[in-house]
Image (cartoon, rainbow, N blue to C red):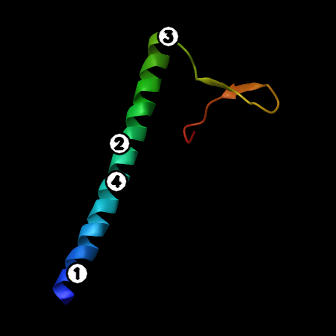
Amino acid sequence: MPQLIFIIVVGSVCWLIYKRFLQAAQRLQQKSRRQESERRTGAIGTLVKDPVTGEYRVKRDDE
């Protein structure tokens, strides 16, 4: 019985690590695509409109 619990815990941890890896890879792919499109168009950054103030600002990497 302890072996079964151990296998379930290890499997769950591996599954969580896998999901985090996929999220990080997707984030990296989106950043790479954005940088490629900025390089092609000669843009310095992507602008985002603030819904509260209505002002535009450069999009940060964590968004």
Report the side of 14 relative to 43 (left or right). left
Residue type of the residue flagged with mark 4: Lys
Query: How crowded is the residue under tag 4: few (<14 C-alpha within 10 Å), some, or many (20+)?
Result: few
Mark 4–mark 3 Cα distance, whole angstroms, equals: 33 Å
Q: Which of labels 3 and 1 is toward the front?
A: 1
| Residue 25 numbered mark, or none | 2
Earlier in the chain: of badge 1 and badge 4, it is 1
| Residue 40 numbered mark, or none | none
Q: Which of labels 3 and 2 is toward the front?
A: 2
| Image quarter in which the N terminus is found | bottom left
Q: For numbered disc 1, what is the local secondary structure?
A: helix
Earlier in the chain: of badge 3 and badge 1, it is 1
Residue type of the residue flagged with mark 1: Phe
| Above-or-below relation of 20 to 29 | below
Query: How crowded is the residue under tag 2: few (<14 C-alpha within 10 Å), some, or many (20+)?
Result: few
Q: Which residue appears at 24% of the width and 68% of the height?
A: 11
Earlier in the chain: of badge 1 and badge 2, it is 1
Residue with the mark numbered 1 = 6
Residue with the mark numbered 3 = 41
**Residue at the far right in the pictured view:** 53
Q: For numbered disc 2, what is the local secondary structure?
A: helix
Quadrant hosting residue 15: bottom left
Quadrant hosting residue 26: top left
Mark 1–mark 4 Cα distance, whole angstroms, equals: 20 Å
| Above-or-below relation of 15 to 50 | below
